Image (cartoon, rainbow, N blue to C red):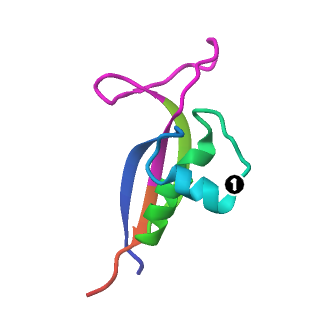
Amino acid sequence: MEQWEYLTEFVWARVESEGWEEYRKANWPNFQPGKFAPETMIPHLNMRGRDAWELVHMEPVVVGKNYDVCVTDGVGGATWSNIYFCAFKRRIQKQ
């Protein structure tokens, strides 16, 4: 039977993200994204993939000062966020 391990983390979308500028120049030299474009997370997500982590869920969230997540009932107004809750899994290698 397959066994899995999991990793969760908040990932910030921002043009200052490590590796973004190099990735952009190599892949989309003419692309000038907005400051918080989701594409800026690609280098970080690729890093996780190289470590065998598969992204299984991604959701924009509002993070509180205690790293808790703000949840709404869906009736209120819109909120902007450049923070994404990501859940990854990878297969546990049998020894």
Nearer to the camera, 9 or 29:
29
**Residue depicted at x 31% and y 22%:** 65
Q: Amino acid at mark 1?
A: Pro
Q: Where residue 36 sits in the image (x, y, percent)?
A: 58, 34
Residue furthest left in the image = 95
- Is residue 73 within the magenta segment? yes
Q: Quadrant of residue 25?
A: bottom right
- From what the image shows, is residue 33 above or below residue 67? below
Image quadrant for the N terminus? bottom left
- From what the image shows, is residue 60 above or below residue 94? above
Does 74 sit left or right of 30 as displayed?
left
Image quadrant for the C terminus? bottom left
Residue furthest right in the image = 30
Q: Quadrant of residue 29?
A: bottom right
Which residue carries the number 1 mark? 29
Q: Where residue 56 sits in the image (x, y, percent)?
A: 53, 57
- From what the image shows, is residue 7 above or below residue 74? below
Does 12 sit left or right of 4 as displayed?
right
Q: Where residue 35 sits in the image (x, y, percent)?
A: 58, 32
Q: Main secondary structure of the magenta part?
A: loop
Q: Quadrant of residue 11?
A: top left
**Residue depicted at x 46% and y 44%:** 17
Does 74 sit left or right of 18 as displayed?
right
- Number of marks: 1
**Residue depicted at x 54% and y 57%:** 22
Which range is magenta? 62-87
